[in-house]
Image: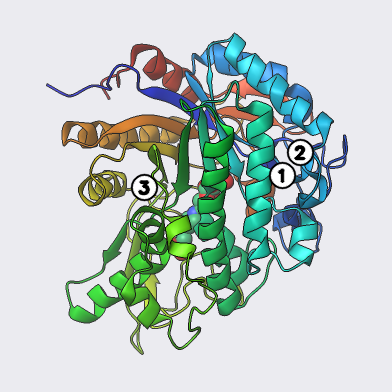
């Protein structure tokens, strides 16, 4: 006897603005850091940019029809900041807001709940030119932007998320430099992390002030399911350091109101954290209606030894680490199945994270806001796309969610990453995460076999036998 998914469980799929919209120069949109970065030679695979992406800006109605055909109950998308507030400050751009109003109306017409993320990595370039996330002012700009979007869409969107994966914005954007804006400075990365936390707190306050009381406010993190390779004290210390930098640097200030003491100690040689002002912890701590968790693969670490294999976390760039204060940590590739990203397939990490947050933050509802896998999908002779590995991946991870529910976790929903193939950041269009195949030459959409499979799960609220 298995516990099934509870009634009211949100079944959805997710996307992000820069990854699908295209229309980078239309209707008053100004460049974001991802436009600048992707147009800089050598930054993305094949020099790919999001200029056209999956052309969702012009295919919004068709894409919402597709969601309805799949039977989705919810759709998680992000708003492009430079589309609705060009330059990142000042008045709104009406055309930009109209796009999201139309999207939300289309969703509501079809009974699909919109789940809106304010920031999925596309900082207006003007704000980066003024210093970006390492500068405190960016957090205040974000709060103004949050208010602007809330005033425009607050009457019809109930589920709001401030940030998506601030770890990536801070440590891949300013630490390893593999994401926009491509800076490689550990102090800037830690300052960015703090100002993203502050942006979350100020943004959540702005949302509460502008939204009706039924609105729900959340944040999405990518907590690491970190395992120590052995039980030795040195390997366990490596695990602790990575856990602090990946996860507790956000959860502790956001949910408890203080940075972890061990994080401050580990990074003391890099910064004295004087950019944290007296009142900041009280602002960052904000009662949330749920916590969003994105999960793809676990992280396996050990203490670095002289004969350890070279670090391979898939995220280093010319030796710049996204883990300041953890340079004596080695990252390992566990044996077993891998996706096209070379990430291991291990659903136990998802169960582990859901149970950890259930234990650490009792009473806080959880939402799996992203989970999915890239595979080398290709249409067959009839144009159909068969992706049995993705079905296996989704089945195993949904089973992990079901086990967490049975073990007492309060999981309210699951969002497959991604609805459609899209611009996979530094990897450009070479990696396909979609349940729906996109032929970029024609922009034709073809649901893969995983989309049909997921549609059955969504409609029945049950996992078929596997
Ligand atoms: C998400 O990022 C994004 O929200 C989404 O936009 C993106 O398309 C999707 O996932 C697929 O990539 O332990 O050093 O090896 C996930 C980004 C990838 C960041 C795995 C952490 C492991 C870092 N995460 N990565 S390491």
Query: Does residue 258 appear to the left or right of 369 in the view shown?
Result: left
Q: Secondary structure at mark 3?
A: loop
Q: Secondary structure at mark 2?
A: helix
Which residue sits at x=40%, y=31%?
414
**Marks 2 and 1, how far apart at CA:** 6 Å
**Total numbered labels placed on residues in the image:** 3
Which residue sits at x=57%, y=63%?
195
From the image, which quarter does the N terminus lie in? top left
**Mark 3 sits on what residue?**
345
Q: Secondary structure at mark 1?
A: helix
**Mark 1 sits on what residue?**
81
257 or 171, nearer to the observer: 257
Is tag 2's residue or tag 3's residue first in the polypeptide sequence? 2
Identify whether 67 is placed above or below 154: above
Q: Quadrant of residue 247?
A: bottom left
Mark 2 vs 1: CB contact within 8 A = yes
Is tag 3's residue or tag 1's residue first in the polypeptide sequence? 1
Can residue 278 be seen from the camera position used here?
yes
């Amino acid at each position: 006897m298995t516990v099934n998914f509870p009634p009211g469980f949100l079944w959805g799929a997710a996307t992000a603005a820069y990854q699908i919209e295209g229309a980078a120069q239309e209707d008053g949109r100004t460049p974001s850091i991802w436009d600048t970065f992707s147009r800089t030679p050598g930054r993305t695979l094949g020099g790919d940019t999001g200029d056209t992406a999956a052309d969702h800006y012009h295919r919004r109605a068709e894409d919402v029809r597709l969601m309805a055909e799949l039977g989705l109950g919810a759709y998680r998308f992000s708003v492009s900041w430079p589309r609705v507030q060009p330059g990142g400050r000042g008045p709104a751009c009406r055309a930009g807001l109209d796009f999201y109003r139309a999207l939300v109306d289309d969703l509501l017409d079809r009974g699909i709940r919109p789940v809106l993320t304010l920031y999925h990595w596309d900082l207006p370039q003007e704000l980066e030119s003024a210093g970006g996330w390492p500068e405190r002012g960016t957090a205040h700009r974000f709060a103004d932007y949050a208010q602007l979007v809330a005033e425009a869409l607050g009457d019809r969107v109930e589920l709001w998320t401030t940030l998506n994966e601030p770890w990536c914005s801070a440590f891949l954007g300013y630490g390893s430099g593999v994401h926009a804006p491509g800076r490689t400075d550990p102090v800037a990365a830690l300052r960015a992390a703090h100002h993203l936390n502050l942006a979350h707190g100020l943004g959540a306050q702005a949302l509460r002030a502008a939204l009706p009381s039924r609105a729900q406010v959340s944040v999405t993190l990518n907590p690491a399911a970190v395992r120590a390779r052995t039980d030795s004290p040195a390997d366990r210390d490596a695990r602790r350091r990575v856990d602090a930098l990946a996860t507790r640097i956000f959860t502790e200030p956001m949910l408890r109101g203080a940075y972890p003491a061990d994080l401050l100690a580990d990074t003391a040689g890099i910064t004295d954290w004087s950019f944290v002002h007296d009142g900041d912890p009280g602002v960052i701590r904000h009662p949330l209606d749920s916590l969003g968790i994105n999960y793809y693969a676990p992280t396996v670490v050990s203490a670095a030894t002289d004969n350890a294999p070279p670090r391979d976390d898939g995220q280093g760039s010319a030796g710049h680490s996204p883990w300041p204060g953890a340079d004596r940590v080695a990252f390992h590739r566990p044996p077993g199945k891998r996706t096209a990203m070379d990430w291991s397939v291990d659903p136990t990490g998802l169960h582990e994270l859901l149970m950890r947050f259930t234990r650490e933050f009792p009473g806080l509802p959880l939402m799996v806001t992203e989970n999915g896998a890239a595979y080398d999908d290709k249409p067959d002779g009839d144009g159909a796309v068969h992706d049995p590995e993705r079905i296996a991946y989704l089945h195993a991870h949904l089973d992990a969610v079901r086990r967490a529910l049975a073990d007492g976790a309060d999981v309210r929903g699951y969002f497959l990453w991604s609805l459609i193939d899209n611009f996979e950041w530094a990897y450009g269009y070479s990696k396909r995460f979609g349940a729906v195949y996109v032929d970029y030459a024609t922009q034709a959409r073809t649901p893969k076999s995983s989309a049909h499979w997921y549609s059955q799960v969504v409609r029945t609220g049950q996992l078929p036998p596997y």
